[in-house]
Amino acid sequence: MSSESIANSSDPETGQDLLQYHGGLMGAILPFLVLIIGVMAIALSGAPDEKGFWPILILALGVGLMLCKDRTAYSNAVIDGMSDRIVMIMITAWILASIVGVLMTITGFVEALTWLVSSFELGPSGYVLSAFIICCIVSLSTGSSFATILICAPILYPVGGLLGAHTPTLAGTILAGATFGDFIAPISDTTISSALSQKADIGATVKSRIKYIWPATLLAIIAFWISSVINSGSSVQQTIDHSGSPNGLPMLLVPVLIIWLFLLKKHLLHGLMAGLLFGTVISILFGLLPYDQLISLDLENFVARSFVIDGINRAVGISFFTILLMGLVGTVKASGLMNQILEFAEKRSKTIQQGETWISGVVSVAVLLTTHSIVAILMVADFTRSSGGRLGINPVRRANLLSLFVCVFPFVLPYFIPVILMAGMTTSGEEFQIPSVAPLYVGLYNFLSWALLLTAIVAVLFGYGRKEDNKL
């Protein structure tokens, strides 16, 4: 693949000229390398939250601007990426979910859930495994990893911290539960896009994934248990009162309503807004929400105070991270880089194992560059279908390979939105003096995704599941 080949063609879908970079292929890749190296360095040093990544993203965008030959086209690509509809949906959802999380905290729901869990005497390790199961059920029911994190994290994380659970393990557990449904739920956008893009039956695809998910889940449970037993109690002061209070139990109706609306396939914003309004009414009726928390004015300092404002402030970090990141992703799409990678892979897929290896490789590269599972699947769908079909790889098998790899990297690497989102949600424990968890450690402790990666490697190298998939 020539280093200049990326800079001399137009987008086959839109007909628009591709971005051209000084240095050709290396010039197109360099801004993203700046992002990855910078984020990993900050994460390894213990970045407290996603705001620490803002300067790195600005630097990466600046490097791209300097290297791009048409800086006006580059600027337009950045704005197009930032203004993508899905970006606004995610940011609005995070803002609403953050407000709901603040509401649940100040109305005593965390203490109520702590009281409830303590009555069962689960202990830190038992609680971690219970949280994993709860998140698996929620993600399987809603089909959304984002919704699972937004619903479960602000509730389960503070409670686990109060019980003395190891916070990185607990954060990884919640993220793992979200990963579970993203891979196998019939209504997951990952399941649907991978199956339909390969013209595979969704029901048969879901059924075929059991053989991949059960060994990975078993390995994850063992790893969560060992990590929890070894580390529990090491990150939280033992003077914290674990008894809690049942007063906030009526607020349990809020997540129940939200999950029920998602099961009815209501829009993400519909469910969260309804939950917020319902929760506000319930909290007032039961006397759980002080009126000055609705809104109050500090006239001396010219400041307005409200749980709504607090919730929005919590969502600022991830919102701006997402906007900047999607701007960079927009330039990757406009560069035509993936087209060059796909052409390179097509020429080298000669056998079934080579075909599966290249399918796995190109979807991994696509998700690493675009940071979005569905975008990555759609970008490589034609290559996967044509190359896999030519080699006789079953559509279900192809769909499974795509999902296996896109359910790994976005859930373990610290510059992906699910990991950043989960790390951001750990700030829900700050009010209880429970430390938040940096994105790097959230991903490292997502043992389900690491187990899925191991399963995927075994599937490609040794053909695990190939024979069963080919029968469907």
Image (cartoon, grey):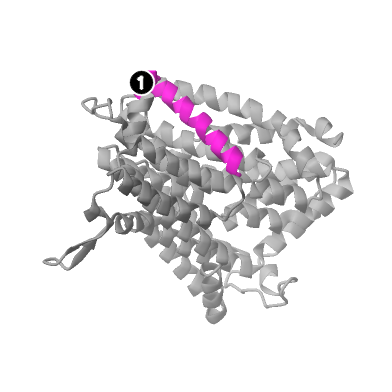
The foreground one among 91 and 440 is: 91
Label 1: which secondary element: helix
Q: Which residues are magenta?
A: 118-143
Residue type pointed to by label 1: Ser
Q: Quadrant of residue 404?
A: top right
Outermost residue on the left side: it is 300
Whether residue 87 is in magenta: the answer is no
Q: Quadrant of the N terminus?
A: bottom right
The residue that disc 1 covers is 119
Q: Residues within 10 Å of mark 1 (few under 14, many from 20)?
A: few
Picture residue at 37% right of the left edge, 53% below the top: 99
Instruction: Answer above or below: position of 48 versus 8.
Output: above
Is 128 magenta? The answer is: yes
Locate residue 90, reporting x and y percent.
Answer: 50, 58
Please say whether residue 413 is visible from this viewpoint.
Answer: no
Give the quarter of the image for residue 159: top left
Q: Is residue 348 left or right of residue 77?
A: right
Q: Position of residue 208 (x, y in %)?
A: 76, 34
Is any part of residue 431 visible from this angle? yes
Report the front residue among 323 and 343.
323
**Residue 143 shown left or right of residue 469 in the figure:** left
Magenta span: helix, strand or loop, mainly?
Answer: helix
Q: Residue at x 81, y 46 (%)?
A: 200
236 vs 231, left or right, is: left
